Image: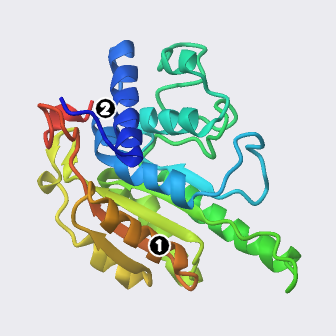
Amino acid sequence: MTLPTDRDALAISTLRFLAVDMVEAAKSGHPGAPLGLAPLAHLIWTRHLRFDPADPAWPDRDRFVLSCGHASALLYGLLHLAGFDLPVAELERFRQLGSKTPGHPERGHTPGVETTTGPLGQGLANAVGMAIAAGALADRFDRPDAPLFEHRVWVLASDGDLMEGVSGEASSLAGHLRLGRLKVFWDDNRISIDGSTDLAFSEDVVARYQAYGWRTLRVEDGNDLAALEAALAAAEAERERPVLVAVRTHIGYGSPKQDSAEAHG
């Protein structure tokens, strides 16, 4: 095996192996999404997300929502590498009673977790509320020479998230309110726990979000760092309406079970 030769590749491989090691140690969990989403998550956290691990409650921090909460091993790896109070010992206790790394993220339990997620669609709906709240705070307290609330809301959402009614209703509201702080990245891996998403889902998600009034972008290869960065920069620059970025990923990337329901966990 050839070792990574650049910092991005090393960080992405580290995120992937941390997730796999956590699931293997627990003998349970969901490795597929972390393997597919690691490049995107790495770029969000290292180049765009504003946060302070020494002050997780900083009022103007960006909010990061892992709406696909079953991919929690990815979030815990990110929090650990970013310097939050989540040591390796806690990663080793993934999904164990009393650990800071439960099977699904829980707000108030793990430093850096913004909202409890697990039921699909819930995290995206929470993120819409966060974007509404951010705008309300800015309207009330910002001054022309002193903007106090500039934070954005970044979301990773799965195929399953976007199948849920709660996410559709919240997304419609976000488009109506033109929530430009909201940036949603769709993990378009086309696999569910039951198999191909074609078994139960065939709608044009991008067209639906365009109808909601969102700006939409596509990345055809979730491992193409240049394409991901271009989409991230465009999403960050958009201030007038919410953004959905459809990212074609591969569940269980690099594993023998890639692109199969067996990789889901």
Q: Local crowd at mark 1 within 10 Å, few (<14), some, or many (≥20)?
A: some
72 or 178, which lies in front?
72
Residue at far front of view: 5
Residue 250, relative to residue 170: is it above or below?
above
Q: Is residue 183 left or right of residue 14?
A: right
- Marks 1/2 in contact by CB < 8 Å: the verdict is no
Is residue 236 toward the left or the right of residue 245 in the image? right
Q: Where, by quadrant of the figure, is residue 6 drawn?
A: top left
The residue located at (38%, 72%) in the rendering is: 230
Front one among 59 and 103:
59
Which mark is drawn over residue 31? Answer: 2
Is 243 placed above or below 194 here? Answer: below
Q: Position of residue 169 (x, y in %)?
A: 47, 68
Q: Is there any visible trace of residue 151 in the rendered image?
A: yes
Say if 158 sits above or below 102 in the image. Answer: below
Are there few (<14), some (14-19), or many (20+) residues within 10 Å of tag 2? many
- Left or right: 69, with 178 as reference point: left
| The C terminus: image quadrant | top left
Three-letter residue code for mark 2? Pro
Circle nearer the N terminus (1, 2):
2
Q: Which residue is mark 1?
A: 233
Quarter of the picture containing the N terminus is: top left
Percent x, y of residue 58: 78, 51
Q: Where is residue 137 drawn, in percent x and y?
A: 80, 70
Residue 29 versus residue 99 in the image, above or below: below
Query: Which mark is drawn over residue 50?
Result: none
